[in-house]
Image (tube, rainbow, N blue to C red):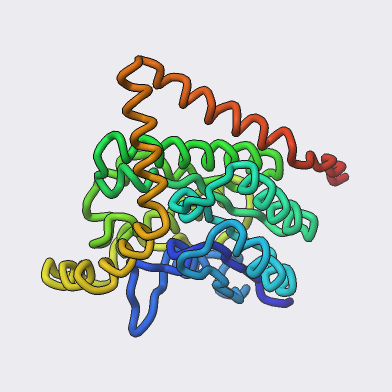
Amino acid sequence: MRPLRFVALGDSLTEGVGDPVGDGWRGWAALLAGGLGEGPAESVEFTNLAVSGSQTRDVLERQLPAGLALRPDVVSVVIGVNDTLRCTFDIHAVAARLDKVYAAFTEQGAVLLTACLPDPGAMLGLPGALARPLARRQRAVNAVVHALSDRYGAVHLHASEGAWLTDRAMWSADRLHPGERGHRQLAVRFHALLAQAGIPTGVAPTAEPEFPAPTKSASLWWLATAGTGWVTRRCTDLLPQLLRLAADEVRHQARGTSARLDARASAAVSAALATVSVPERRPEAA
C-alpha cells in the first residue's frame, strides 16, 4: 500500500513562518501531516510547496502544477492575505484563481483543506481608517473562500474567529504569523475537522509547544531585522493605495455613508462568485 500523500500550498503561514525548527520553519501543515494516516502502519508523504509572500496568482501558476503532479490524497490551499496587502487587489481575480485551484484538486479526488484567515490590519493594530479597508478586503476574500469551500466540499477551518486571535501566546513577534503554539492550534483544529468529516486520521498533534517561546530580546531582534524588511516591502507596494483608501474611508465616515463601502464590497463578492464555474455534483457512491 502506497503512503498517504499530503501536499500543502500557500504562503508564509503554511510555509511555517513563526514556528522555527533547526535552520528552517516547520508550521501547522507539517504538524498535521504527523497526525494523518490510519495509525503507524500507514506512512505519510508530506510535501510543502508553500512560499512566503505568495498570492493566489502564485498558487495557481506555480504551486498548482507541482501539486497536481504529486497526485495528493489530501491537499491544503490556504492563501489570500498577501492579495489584500497589494495595490493590485482584485476580488474577481482571487475568486477565479481559487475556483480553478479547488476544481483541479477535487477533480483528482483529493480531500481539500481550506481556511478563512484573520484580518491583517487588526492583527497589526493599525488605526481605524487604515485598518477598515484591509478588513473589508479580508472579509471579501473570506466570503469567497467560504462559498467556494462549500461548493467543492472542502474541509474548511474558520481561522478568522475565536479566542486564539487575542491570545498573545499564540502569535509570533510580528503579530501576523502564529508562533509554535498557534501553529499547533491550527493543526489540532484541522485534525478534528478531518475526523468529524469521517476521514481516517492518526493520533492528533499535541497542542502543547515542544520548544520554549522566543525571548523578548529575540523577538525584538527579529522585528529589527527581518521584520523591518517585511514592513518596508509591503509599505512600498501598499502604502500609497492604503492612504487613498483611508482618505476615502474618512470622507464616507464624515458624510455618514460608510455603509456604501460595505455594500460595494459585498456586491463585488457576489459578482465575483457569479462568474466562476459551478461544477456538476458527482453521483453518490453506491
Q: Is residue 137 left or right of residue 60?
A: left
Q: Position of residue 216 (x, y in %)?
A: 12, 66
Classify 12 as above or below 83.
below
Q: Position of residue 39 (x, y in %)?
A: 56, 68
Instruction: Please report the residue visible at 69 percent of the width from the left and 47 percent of the height from the top.
Output: 96
Q: Is residue 138 left or right of residue 211?
A: right
Instruction: Please report the residue visible at 58 percent of the width from the left and 64 percent of the height from the top.
Output: 9
Query: In the displayed image of the protein, which residue is found farthest to the bottom?
Result: 23
Q: Position of residue 282 (x, y in %)?
A: 84, 44
In this orientation, which residue lies closer to the viewer: 167 or 51? Answer: 51
In this orientation, which residue lies closer to the viewer: 236 or 138? Answer: 236
Give the quadrant of residue 181. Answer: bottom left
Instruction: Please report the residue visible at 72 percent of the width from the left and 77 percent of the height from the top.
Output: 2
Instruction: Please report the residue visible at 57 percent of the width from the left and 60 percent of the height from the top.
Output: 201
Is residue 19 at least partly visible in the picture?
A: yes
Q: Quadrant of the C terminus?
A: top right
Classify 136 as above or below 227.
above
Q: Is residue 219 left or right of residue 12?
A: left
Q: Position of residue 117 (x, y in %)?
A: 45, 47
